Amino acid sequence: MLDVQKVKQRIAELRKLPGIAPKSISEILEENGFTRRDFLKWSGALAVTLGLPASFAPVVAEAAEVSDRLPVVWLHLAECTGCSESLLRTDAPTIDDLIFNYINLQYHDTIMAAAGWQAEENYEDALEKFKGRYVLCVEGGVPTKDGGEYLTIGPHAETGLHKLKRTAKDAAAIIAVGTCSSFGGIQAAAPNPTGAKGIHKVLNKQVINVPGCPPSAKNIVGTIVYVILFGQLPAVDNFNRPKFAYGLRIHDLCERRGHFDAGEFVEEFGSEEAMNGFCLYKKGCKGPYTFNNCSRERFNQHTSWPVQAGHGCIGCSEPDFWDSMAPYEEPLANHKFSSVSADATADKVGITILTVAGVAIAAHAAISAIKNPKE
């Protein structure tokens, strides 16, 4: 049972730790045009996202205000930096990315001014100064073949595999940001010449996966805020994804779901059906097989997401999606595949389940088409 008083006690303990950021979150938000009311509304919305009762909204705000007490060390492994870019490249700052930037990033290749030996010194200082206290965020899969020699980092040419293990050793929490870090990503797609893996496969500590290509800022910030609130990682599904973000399928809350149920499908991109927002399942949408909250949280300051923009979900938050979900413009029911993903619940994995589910969806669509003369 969730106890608000215990959470408040934890926040009180965090307040005793020295603040690291030069300004308070209140000052940062005010400078960017956000009022206290805006902040509290954001806190209430984040509480709902985290699956917490409304009574937790004030303590979520308090947790955000002490977020710099848990500094972040961010490692880049084998990836494209898209997860960081999605957080940093907004046309106007949101409370999510302000708090993300405000959380003390002790080490982050993309945004820190330091380079070379100075960057390495900052990294070593952070590991020593905040030992047992920092949150480790990892972006990118980790090559493991030949001892990890396919990825070397920094002036010492340290392998990503070794640097990951060394950094994870004294981390208070470990978050795999994005599908590459969670499951290996495109680097792990067949034939996977570098032996790339999700970081949980090489660490002996609990890792929470926040997959997506890229994941939303709210899922990343929400996971960190949860750690601040409770001093532990949130409840996870069978793939170690936080249930508050990955507990439902894209299909469950999709705005095109009504058209699916009515048997109204897009047959060709650019058609009248496409312009009328019909279901994209026949054009390969993987929403019925994909667990994520994109259809609820969206991207670009909550304005849109791929399905709303006119292209089906490609299943990017699922393991091995590069292999199991392709080709992206064809339904899985028509595709013979060898990798496995999940359907119905994230705890049911297996090619038989997925194949049967695919046939069931195709049958549902066919029945709906018979009922609907327009199809």
Image (tube, rainbow, N blue to C red):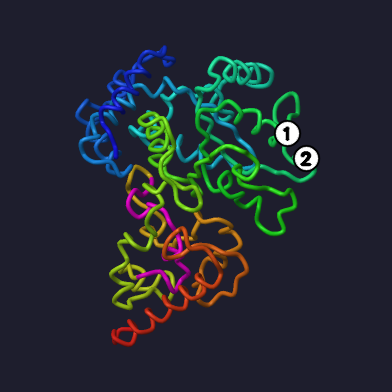
Image quadrant containing the N terminus: top left
Residue 76 on image: x %, y %: 60, 35
Query: Disc 2 marks which amino acid?
Result: Gly
The question of residue 46 being in magenta is answered with no
Query: Residue at (39%, 29%) from the top-left corner?
Result: 228
Residue 127 shown left or right of residue 255 in the figure: right
Q: How many marks?
A: 2
Residue 21 shown left or right of residue 195 in the figure: left
- Res 258 quadrant in image: bottom left
Looking at the rendered structure, which numbered label has been put on residue 159?
1
Q: Between residue 285 and residue 226, name the one nearer to us.
A: 226
- Res 4 quadrant in image: top left
Query: Residue at (65%, 33%) from the top-left corner?
Result: 165
Residue 91 shown left or right of residue 36 in the figure: right
Cβ–Cβ under 8 Å for marks 2 and 1:
yes
- Sequence-wise, which precedes: disc 2 or disc 1? 2
Query: Residue at (30%, 18%) from the top-left corner?
Result: 27
Q: Which residue is mark 2?
A: 147
Vertical side of 71 occupied by 240: above or below:
below
Residue 355 on image: x %, y %: 52, 74
The local secondary structure at tag 2 comes to helix
- Res 306 quadrant in image: bottom left
Q: Between residue 103 and residue 271, name the one nearer to us.
A: 103
Residue 262 on image: x %, y %: 29, 76
Query: Residue at (47%, 41%) from the top-left corner?
Result: 86
Residue 234 on image: x %, y %: 41, 40
Q: Which residues are magenta?
A: 279-299
The question of residue 292 being in magenta is answered with yes
Residue farthest along the right direction in this orientation? 146
Query: Disc 1 marks which amino acid?
Result: Thr
Vertical side of 96 occupied by 334: above or below:
below
